[in-house]
Amino acid sequence: MNATKVIDCAVHHDWDDQAEVVQYLGKAWKEYVGEPGSLPWGFGSKYIGLDVPYKNPTIHDPYVSSFQIRSDSERPMRSVNGLIGELDGEGVDAGILVYGSSMLLPGDNNVYLGKELISAANRWTQEMWLEEGQGRLWGSILVPNQLPVEAAKEIRNYASSRYMIQVAIGANGLSKPLGHPIYDPIYKAACDLGLPVVINSFGDALIDSLAHPTAGGPPAGYVESRVLASQPLITHACSLIAQGTFEKFRDLQVVLIGAGVAWLPSFLWRFDVNMGAFGRESPWLTKSPLEYFESNFHVCTYRLGAVPSRQRFELVAGKVSTDGSMYMYGSGRPFADFDPLARVREIVPAEWHSNVLGGSARALYPRLSIEDVSAPAQS
Amino acid sequence: MKKPDAAYVVVGSPDEFQDGTPKIIEIEDVGSVGVVRWNGEYYAFRNQCPHQYGPVGRGRVHPAMHGSKAGQAELEPGPGVIVCPWHKYEYRLDSGQGLRRRQFNLEILSAELTNGEVRVWRRRNSESC
């Protein structure tokens, strides 16, 4: 019997030096960004990344965002061989790259520079990670979502890519919930190519945009931002469903990363009840919110957080998916709060393993192919 | 309280009805019933919301609303929906089917205007409800 191949659906690959990405810019934009060291004291280059105000309190480098952990243990994962070594160490067969620092590029208020950097980041991902990934790494097409028409073009640039298997929305540059019709060109392109769209909760953590990561105002620090990580995902899932995105694009699939799964039951129950009462506001819906969620969403396990036991996990997660087919294993590596595979195996019910650890991903991503993967468990 | 005879109960004359506003009638062996006129037709239903047993007959009738595509809102011709005043759940007047949450269905009865009388019969909802 073939063991299920384990697929990690939330690997935040990152650059060790921004020059890795900058090299893919056009000449003029490279000139604009500048050359490190071209000025005294090592200056001369614009930092291409954006930043979030919520810093991991265990990291004391003020120039490092919470996405950038420059510890010696984490550094090896900033290379493809280092990352593959890390996957091997845990018995993970494949990883899907969903960006670290680059995730924030769509939030750049200089939208044209952001667009160029995003294209560069996609080429960097394709050439330096996926093509060198020994067939173990797959990637996401990051999009300049402030320019949806350009974003659609960027998606179509990878129409025949073997390794790009989904679209990453990244930072919420327009500060609009993602069901707003302005994003329709992105969803159309994704749908036309059969590519799911991935939304990461920390795309709303930028201080450069109006969208805050939490309702009620920006949280004061790292802990609060982590505790409240589900809020942006709730906003976007609610918007996508209520605004009829899945009536316009019935085959569109969405992946949610960054807040675990425990937030789902109360959100979906509340959504169903309220849509039942006030559905005149969205009369174009033909299904209940729960039905849309079941047919069009998958959720990564990252972060499981401090789930006390498998029993408690199943009690909550099982309310929404009785066989785990909605969930996909995501470690969140190399972030400090990543979920080791052993921990996920311990918490997720054994009868769900074949779905959660690889089967759900294999069913979702038509371009993803690993030899000898066992068939996903049928519900 | 109106007593049902073998076929129907007379619940009033047309001038006792205001379009879209149900009249609540107690019918022996049936219970509280709402009767309403909408677009020239008469409809009757049990005055108990299947959601949380609210007095659905104290609500008002509105046109059913749907959208043929996202972003478009259109009014459906024909039977409207009775909207329960408690939680605003909507039920089609002709079938009792819940509009937004299909697992909730209002028990409906037959009603019609005959010889100047508004009459209510008892009948079951269709099996699809």
Image (cartoon, coloured by chain):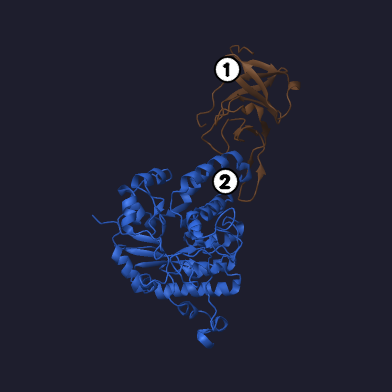
Chain colours: A blue, B brown
Q: Could you tell me residue A157's position as x and y percent?
A: 50, 71
Measure the C-alpha gap from mark 1 to mark 2.
Answer: 35 Å
Identity, as a three-letter code, of the amino acid under mark 1? Val
Identity, as a three-letter code, of the amino acid under mark 2? Leu
Dot 1 corresponds to which residue? B30
Residue at position x 55%, y 57% in the image: A219
Residue A38 appears in view: no
Q: Residue lying at the far right in this picture: please name it.
A: B15
A143 w.r.t. B19: above or below: below
Residue at position x 47%, y 80% in the image: A19
Q: Could you tell me residue A279's position as x and y percent?
A: 60, 42
Dot 2 corresponds to which residue? A285
Residue A118 appears in view: yes
Residue at position x 54%, y 26% in the image: B125
The dot on residue A309 is none
Q: Which is more toward the observer, A329 or B24?
A: A329
- SS at badge 1: loop
Locate residue A259 relative to residue B16 in the image: left or right.
Answer: left
For the N terminus of chain A, give its image quadrant. Answer: bottom left
